[in-house]
Amino acid sequence: MKIKFLYALLIITIIGSIFTKFILANTTWNFLDFTHDIDIYQIGEADSVDAKDDLYIRSSNENINDFVYSSKPVTSKISGYPTSFWKSNWDDQTKIVFDRPVLLGDPVEKKWNGQSVIFASYQTEVTITVNQNKDYKDIRKEQWLDLYAFIPTGIEKQYKRVFVDVLFPDGGSPEILSVFPVNADKDSKDELAFIISWYQRHYDFGGYFYQVFLYDDFKDGIIKPLEDLDKHFDIQDGDISFTKESEGGAIVGPDKVAKFKTEESVKRELKRLGF
């Protein structure tokens, strides 16, 4: 009796397997049926500095690098952005994994509206997985850059860490070339400018893209971008050499030279615009 039962179970399993393969072979799969939210993962615990209101004490003998390193965020600021942001930039087949941020380069200390402000950037390696179809996933790694300012609070040796912006790759990873105060509106306080570059290496051109990002002065606890002026300093401003592949080798085409890649050129252009 037991043998007959096991034999019948085996027959049912074989038939079920054949039926399942037939169904799979004749079904159009749509991952939207299974995933409805972008899947955001963070490595490590939640950003505990939020509980401290991002306030940090710099000891008397602590240099800038050590202070900024010890005050680094636990995860990229962008990982806490609302779902609406993710859905407007990525489809719902995307899983994003954040590694821990690392301090990129040396922080700089600049006078900004009468205060000595420390500027730092933290690079986060991000793994992006996109389900293209049921058999293939596109996996890539990118380096995203968070910009921060450490602004004195008025209490001795105390700073508030203020998020400025997050920068994404464009061909290459973003790098900060310069940060400096500028006059970019009609009030009495200085605004802030960052010059960013992206290294480019493609089959038909190579070089660097540049963009100037402008921000309003620090008020109400935040630093807001001046988006209308940002558009004036477009990302396609760059030092680019164009090439075309041919049987005779690479033919160098006309070069493009960036207009705005130095502090002097940015300030000169802002003055021309009436600021």
Image (cartoon, rainbow, N blue to C red):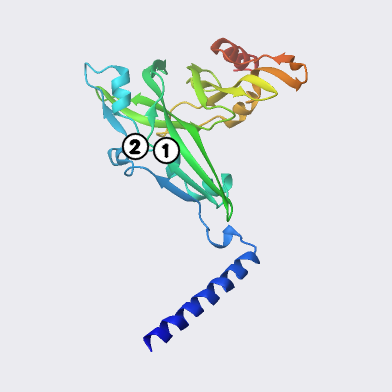
Going by the numbered disc 1, the residue's amino acid type is Lys
Residue farthest to the left? 60
- Image quarter of residue 206: top right
Per the image, label 2 sits on a secondary structure element best described as loop
50 or 200, nearer to the observer = 200
Per the image, label 1 sits on a secondary structure element best described as helix
Q: Position of residue 249 (x, y in %)?
A: 74, 17
Kindly identify the residue that appears in the image at 47 percent across and 83 percent down: 8
Residue of label 2: 74
Kindly identify the residue that appears in the image at 63 percent across and 15 percent down: 269
Q: Residues within 10 Å of mark 2 (few under 14, many from 20)?
A: some
Residue farthest to the right? 247
119 or 16, nearer to the observer = 16
Q: Are marks 2 and 1 in contact (CB under 8 Å)?
A: no
In space, the residues marked 2 and 1 are separated at their CA atoms by 9 Å
Q: Which labelled disc corresponds to residue 77? A: 1
Whether residue 165 is situated above or below residue 17 in the rendered picture: above
Going by the numbered disc 2, the residue's amino acid type is Val
Counting every numbered tag in the picture gives 2
